[in-house]
Amino acid sequence: MGRLTIDAVLAITDIVESMHKRVSPLSGAKSTTEEEHLSGISGLVYRNIRNVTQRVGKSIDAPLAAISTVLDSQPDSSSTQSLLAALNGVLGDHLVLSKNALAIPMHFRRKGQILNETQLRELINQSNGKILVMVHGLCMNDLQWDHEGHDHGAELARESGMGAIYLHYNTGQHISDNGQQFASLLESLVNLSDKHLEINILAHSMGGLVSRSAFHVAENSGHLWPEQLKNLIFLGTPHHGAALEKAGNWIDLILGAHSYTVPFARLVKVRSSGITDLRYGNVQELDWHATERFEFSGDQRLPLPLPNKLKCFAVATSAKESLTYPLGDGLVRIKSALGEHQDPAFHLNIPDTRKWVGTNINHMQLLSDPKVYQVLKTWFEIE
């Protein structure tokens, strides 16, 4: 947290200096070189702020490391993990690039604890190879599948005999990066046992895009696990983007339209690659690698259909009584959650018998609503 504070001070200093540079020409001639911009009293002030901040940052690394060691020895509370998950969702890519210890590494977990190879083998044997993988959404963690006293994964495992495991990952990274890691993790899972697995994935929100990305990576890499994947179920997944991130991109455009508001646009851009991937539902690296992620450039995705041999299901809801509510479940519109698109190349063609649409259920209530759970039981063929 100390290192993030240092980064924030430096970033705000940059923004203030940028604003100063843009306003100062109003009272005189424009400077033409970086040296001229940084000359005089204002340049000295900005340089001193940066120098002092960086020195302070270096001096507190050692005590922060000691404090971190003490914290690591204590059991994590659910509130601490929720805060860490939210932090990774907003700044996760920055945490990775700056090698900050707060970055969440990807693991399979259960009850908030990392599952080692021995525990995973035991779970495979106990469930006779039937595995349910739960993949959470943006700014969340595996513990938050337990919502309002109900956990879809735990209940489905209890009623079906499947072994439930929970993916825990940094939602601030690009979806394609998380997809690549998830694909490798699933491949390591199937290599743990000689038993043929039956893998089922239940994914909420961004988790559905990460799962699609993982399947795409696995097929191109010759992985074994796609042949053992039976069901892929999406709960409120923004297959064609989330309305609120599109609104954020409009703010980028508006603030960046005038030279004197450009510095403020940089404040709006304090959001992760994972969040900006949700604007249109980027799944592949090719969807984003050639564009500046805050540029208002329209949907640049390449079509990525769902595999025909895989049974895919989708749940979409409206937070209101009406199915025409423009924000759908409050974050994801109904057509986006169902994978429907006016361009046939992007239409995911999920059969109507494998879609379900509900009302008066918001994005978070997808995790606990009884009607949603009954639909899941039907799809998993649980009586």
Image: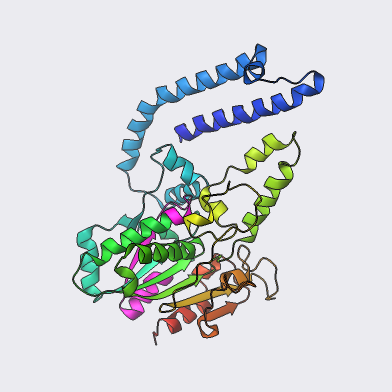
Q: Which of 282 and 15 is in front in this view?
A: 282
Q: Can residue 140 be seen in this view?
A: no
**Quarter-of-image position of residue 69:** top left
Residue 15 percent across, percent down from the top left: 64, 31
Q: Is residue 92 visible?
A: yes
User: In the image, is residue 161 part of the stretch drawn in magenta?
Assistant: yes
Q: Residue furthest top?
A: 40
Residue 97 percent across, percent down from the top left: 43, 39
Left or right of residue 3, residue 365 in this image: right
Residue found at x 39% / y 84%: 382
Q: Nearer the viewer, residue 264 or 301?
A: 301
Q: Residue furthest bottom?
A: 383
* Colouring scheme, one of rainbow, by chain, secondary structure, one colour: rainbow
Q: In this view, does 192 lie above or below 269?
A: below
Residue 71 percent across, percent down from the top left: 35, 40
Residue found at x 60% / y 27%: 13
Residue 213 percent across, percent down from the top left: 44, 62
- Look at the image and give the residue range highlighted in magenta: 151-177
Q: Which of 195 and 299 is in front in this view?
A: 299
Give the total of numbered labels.
0
Q: Image quadrant for the C terminus? A: bottom left
Left or right of residue 109, residue 281 in this image: right
**Quarter-of-image position of residue 238:** bottom right
Q: Is residue 193 above or below residue 140?
A: below
User: In the image, is residue 224 part of the stretch drawn in magenta?
Assistant: no
Residue found at x 48% / y 50%: 172
